[in-house]
Amino acid sequence: MNIEGTISRAIGDLPRLKSIDFRGNRLSGEIPREISKLKQLKHLDLAQNNFSGMIPELIHWSKMQYIGLHYNNLVGTLPDDICRLTKLSIFNVRYNHLTGSIPNSIGNCTSLKIMDLSFNHFSGEIPLNICYLHITTLSLSDNNLFGRIPYMIDMMQSLAILDLSNNRLSGFLPPLLGNLTHINQMNLQGNMLTGPIPPEFGQMTNLHYLELQDNKLTGHIPRELGNLTKLFHLNLANNFLEGHIPEHLSHCQNLNTLNVHKNQLIGTVPNTFKKLKSMTKLNLSSNYLEGPMPTALTRIINLDTLDLSHNQFSGPIPSSIGDLQYLLKLNLSNNNLDGVIPFSLGNLRNVIMEIDCSYNHLSGQIPMELTQLQNLFFLNLSYNNLSGDIPTANNFTRFSNLSFIGNPFLHPSSPISVSDDTNRDDENSKTRQWWIVYVSLLISVPTLVGKKEDANCCLGFLCNEFLCYTRLGTTPVGWKKREIVCRSYCLRRKDDDGLCDMSLGSVQMEGKELEQRSTAGAGHAGSRHRHRRRGRMEGRRISLLILSYPIPPTSV
């Protein structure tokens, strides 16, 4: 329904009314005070409207069992007379703008089973009396609560869901939480909790969800968590946990999600993780894990997300990665992986959507099988040692050149035409046109033998103003002094006498700028200059592809 308007004050003239349900409408205005006079009222549901103002007095609602005021715009504090509601079973004021502290008298609501005060602006400490409630669901998340978790919280033996997330709670995790043997979900994320994860947490054998991320927890991940055989979701991200990942976690046969992102974990990934057949999301990123990329992970056949980025994994990517038939996202970036990109990734043509292998030491060509990945919309292979042509077929038309930047031996399969759209000053409006030039050099010694003037003739493309297209980007890279490109200096102009040097691996060349002929054209590099080559060069043959385009004169 979409009822609009306000609730009439005449509602107080219905003394026998037992239930009010206006849930999910467009009612607004304040909740009339007269509603407090309805002494027979047992059920009040005004959720998902636009009510404002304060919660009316509760003193006459001695028979009230259900209050649902969530998803409104209520302000003010919780009425102190909430302690009179001894038959109240469910109290939900989630998503309002309530302030103040949680009243100590809340502990007198002895029939309360579900209390949700989340997404408000409550402050202060969690009252100790709350531990006397025989409650099944307690949600106080996303408020401004501070202080410690009540040390008597283990008295809430009926508790199935505990959510204290996104507050300012501090102190250690109480080991007594482990006595909550009926608890199903515990969310303490987004606080300032410190100290270790208590081994006693391994006693919560009915636990399905454990979220401790975004705290300041230290110490090791307790092996006792492996006793939680019903655990479905474990998130320990953004803490200061250290040590190894315990093998006992592989006993959590129902584990679907494991996230230990951004901790200080070391060592290798347990080989026993291959037993986690129910796992779909695994995030081990931003730690200090090392060793070969574990093939055990490629046996977790239901994985759809695998993130091993920002670690110290080394060696090749196992070809068995292509056996993960449900894989959607793969992030192996910022490791020490080498070898080739396995062509078996082509087996994932109907599933995989994201691949990030950037900042490794991968070599060889980009497998053409990757062009068959129909759903791939994000690809990052930048900053490796890949070589050969960049494929242009099928899905590769979606990717910009930034996906391949930083691979010195990787080049487009056809020449690139680049135009300079930079605004030009009037005094720098004159441009120079340079053509694509192939220069074949015979080089064996680190430095060319002969005079600097002789070496000029070998590199006819050097000039006063030079813009070097070295990064496979769609925009030319502006020339800077001593700019590092492909782990070496590309070109450097010396201001005193125009000397330039060019570094290609271990080969160093230097010489003065050359005077260009007035006639332009693409041809052999030596035919475009007045000088003939006199320097001595011998050894292995290296082919250079130099890409240049119209540029304004610039100062270096």
Image (cartoon, rainbow, N blue to C red):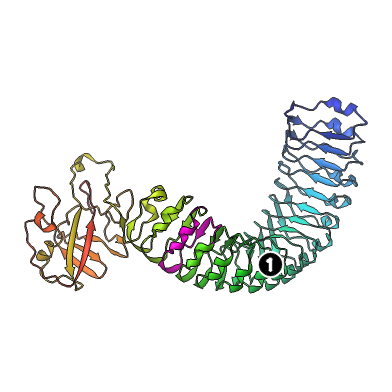
For residue 188, what is the image quadrant?
bottom right
The reply to whether residue 154 is visible in this rendering is yes
Quarter occupied by the N terminus: top right
Task: Name the element at disc 1.
Answer: loop
**Residue 84 position in % (x across, y down):** 90, 45
Q: Nearer the viewer, residue 258 or 342?
A: 342
Quarter occupied by the C terminus: bottom left
Q: Is residue 292 left or right of residue 113?
A: left
Q: Is residue 433 left or right of residue 24?
A: left
**Residue 502 position in % (x across, y down):** 22, 63
Which residue position holds label 1? 252
Mark 1: amino acid: Cys
Q: Residues within 10 Å of mark 1 (few under 14, many from 20)?
A: many
> Range of the magenta residues?
324-350
Number of labels in the image equals 1
Q: Is residue 332 magenta?
A: yes
Residue drawn at (21%, 72%) of the image: 446
Residue drawn at (67%, 53%) of the image: 166
Q: Is residue 441 left or right of residue 196?
A: left
For residue 380, what is the image quadrant?
bottom left
Q: Is residue 484 magenta?
A: no
Q: Nearer the viewer, residue 549 or 497?
A: 549
Residue drawn at (15%, 72%) of the image: 538
Q: Where 516 falls versus 276 (above or below)?
A: above
